Amino acid sequence: MIFINLILLICMISCQNNNSDENASDEILYTMPEESEAHEGTWLQWPHHYQYGLTYRNEIDPTWVTMTKALVTSEKVHIIAYNETEKTRIIALLTAANVSLTNIDFKIYQTDDVWVRDNGPIYVRDKNGNLVIEDWGFNGWGEKADFEKCDLIPAKIGVDQRRTVINLNNEMVNEGGAVEIDGNGTLLATKSAILNTNRNPGLSQADAEAIFKTYLGVTNVIWLDGVAGLEITDMHIDGFARFGNTTTIVTMNQANLLEWDVPQTDINKLYAAKNKNGTTYSFVYLPLTQNDVVKNDGTNLGYKGSYVNYYIANSKVLVPNYNDANDAVANQIIQNLYPTRTVVGIDVRNLYANGGMIHCVTQQQPL
């Protein structure tokens, strides 16, 4: 254990020092694979009671069990457990649900919360095609929540996988849910979640675009303004607009986007978006839930749910469901978009009460 901790410390120091050699330039150094490309596995940070208590953990445990059950027949599932006690508890939950452990491995890392999309590793390929981890800055969405444990996760995974880690903590705070890429050189994001003084004070739009070009391999950035302060993420893009593939944007119709509090000017920009070659995208429109979301215990959240925050696995697509009439409608639309994959509806009502859905709590590791 002492040896492992020493290696981790050395790696973290090395990662911190490599910033001077890896500063953003006009050159593309790394390219991020699009989510629908083949995965080696999916990362999950399992809920625990050490931060927000037993009720929080117990209410959302079933969502993780259901996600894991769907994913194990698609790819490996890398589960981050808070400690050995939690690992034992998780195994018991999965065993009780008849989930095979064959395709699952566990990592013991302390975490603040479950949002691995935002704090976890971003896997990219270098110029030689090698898969490496990028460790972007994470500060709890502008220091709105505890983040210190989660911020260490990419470096810890890099040590365990003996994989190169590119430390970008001093370059940019950037959550995975704040950016969408089409896999063909275009990135979609909101300024409110990136060019925000609570994340990146003094960072200009040009600075951000240079960083994205160098480390994600994009040359075309579609900026929406977003709305800062509306909710904890300052309007992450993956709640209302995603790239379904290299030519398609998945979003909502104008009325639903307005209900999601997307400004009309942003709606206009989104619908007029073009790829790096100047070609307009095709659009797929998902509904909001028909009714306000009601938790499993009957608590009405007072707002509707989005289906855009789905996750593309190798053979499955995990779609947030809400025990709502529009679940079937959204599931079928997404099934039509991914005919070679099987759509699995995942009940996210209790998770949604805490601000997120399926895409927020999953992170892909490409082949």
Image (spheres, helix red, strand yellow):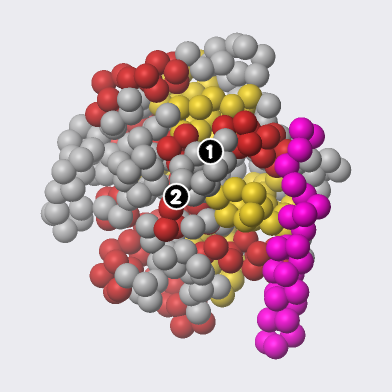
Estimate the spatial distance between the alpha carbons at disc 1 and disc 2, rounded to whole Å. Answer: 17 Å
**Where 256 falls versus 356 (above or below)?**
above
Residue denoted by label 2 = 198
Q: Nearer the viewer, mark 1 or mark 2?
A: 2
Q: Is-magenta flag for residue 6? A: yes
Which residues are drawn in magenta?
A: 1-27
For the residue carrying disc 2, how many other residues have a C-alpha within 10 Å: few (<14), some (14-19), or many (20+)? Answer: some
Image quadrant where residue 287 sits: top left
> Is residue 278 something that shows in the picture?
yes
Q: Residue furthest right?
A: 128
**Residue at the spot 51% in from the left edge and 64% down from the top edge:** 150
For badge 1, the amino acid type reads: Val
Q: Nearer the viewer, residue 323 or 164?
A: 164
**Residue at the spot 62% in from the left edge and 56% down from the top edge:** 169
Q: Position of residue 299 (x, y in %)?
A: 14, 54
Between discs 1 and 2, the one toward the N terminus: 1
**Where 22 falls versus 47 (above or below)?**
above
Q: Position of residue 126 (x, y in %)?
A: 79, 44
For badge 2, the amino acid type reads: Asn
> Is residue 46 something that shows in the picture?
no
Residue denoted by label 1 = 179
Relative to 330, is 120 on the left or the right?
right
Relative to 171, is 260 on the left or the right?
left
**Where 194 falls versus 60 (above or below)?**
above
Q: Is-magenta flag for residue 364? A: no
Image quadrant where residue 252 sits: top left
What is the secondary structure assignment of the residue under circle 1?
strand
